[in-house]
Image (tube, rainbow, N blue to C red):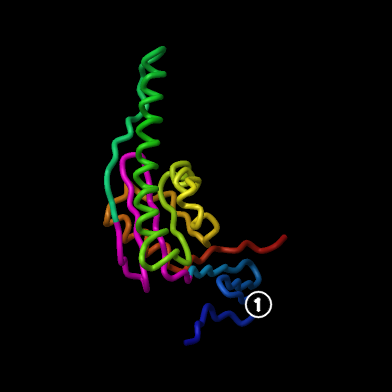
Amino acid sequence: MSHRLLEHPEAAVEAGDTVTTVRWDGGGARCEWFRADPLGLVLIRRGGYAVGLARGGVLQTSKAGRRHVQGRTAAGGWSQQRFARRRENQADALVEAVVGHVERILVKGEGGIPDGLVLGGDRALAAAVLADPRCRALRDLPRRELPDLPDPDARVLAEALRRGRSVWIVPVPQPS
């Protein structure tokens, strides 16, 4: 199967395994492929999570759920500190739950470690999940990050899979 990116009479093409850059007078475009298969997905936000494993663009196994993490409060003094500790404890419980699902689905699952990873949602919470020793095998996988996803559920997990596998086309400015 051949891929025809762009037709431009004066285009210069730099092709790689996962990135192809096409340049012409006035600019260009960089096309980024993410061909990892199987693909692991980890989406986490305060209040929800979703973990999945996809093969050939189809979700094979997934788990989505909700965990309450209290928002900030206007209270001051001791109350503010108490609420901050409660939020921190709730966030720790959320990360612990997600790590358990990641371990079960992506690390110890019957398909083995996936070839790539899509991370979505809150970057700090996602980093906390990957920092757990049980997720060590996933840390250095090729990855795509989708921080703009809404609260994770099964529908958002399917959207993350679609976006994670799509070709990203990034405009390249003309060098000065």
Q: Is residue 76 above or below residue 83?
A: above
Residue lying furthest top in this view? 77
Is residue 27 rendered to the left or right of residue 159? right
The verdict on residue 40 being magenta is yes
Which percent across, then down, holds residue 63?
29, 54
**Residue 130 spot, x, y in % from top left:** 48, 49
Q: Position of residue 110 (x, y in %)?
A: 36, 66
Please determine whether, in this image, residue 52 is positioned above or below residue 48: below
Magenta range: 35-62
Q: At 37% from the left edge and 26% from the top edge, which residue is drawn? A: 72
Q: Mark 1, residues whose alpha carbon is within 10 Å: few (<14), some, or many (≥20)?
A: few
Q: Tell me the quarter of the picture where residue 77 sits.
A: top left
- Element under disc 1: strand
Query: Which residue, given by chain and number where applicable, does mark 1 sit on?
Result: 12
The quadrant of the image that shows the C terminus is: bottom right
Residue 41: percent from left, percent from top: 39, 58
Q: Is residue 31 left or right of residue 72?
A: right
Does the segment drawn in magenta span residue 156?
no
Q: State how many labels appear.
A: 1
Q: Farthest bottom residue?
A: 1
Residue at image coords 49%, 48%: 133
At x 52% / y 78%, what residue is drawn? 5
* 159 vs 52, nearest the viewer: 52
- The amino acid sitting under disc 1 is Ala
From the image, give the main secondary structure of the stretch colored magenta.
strand
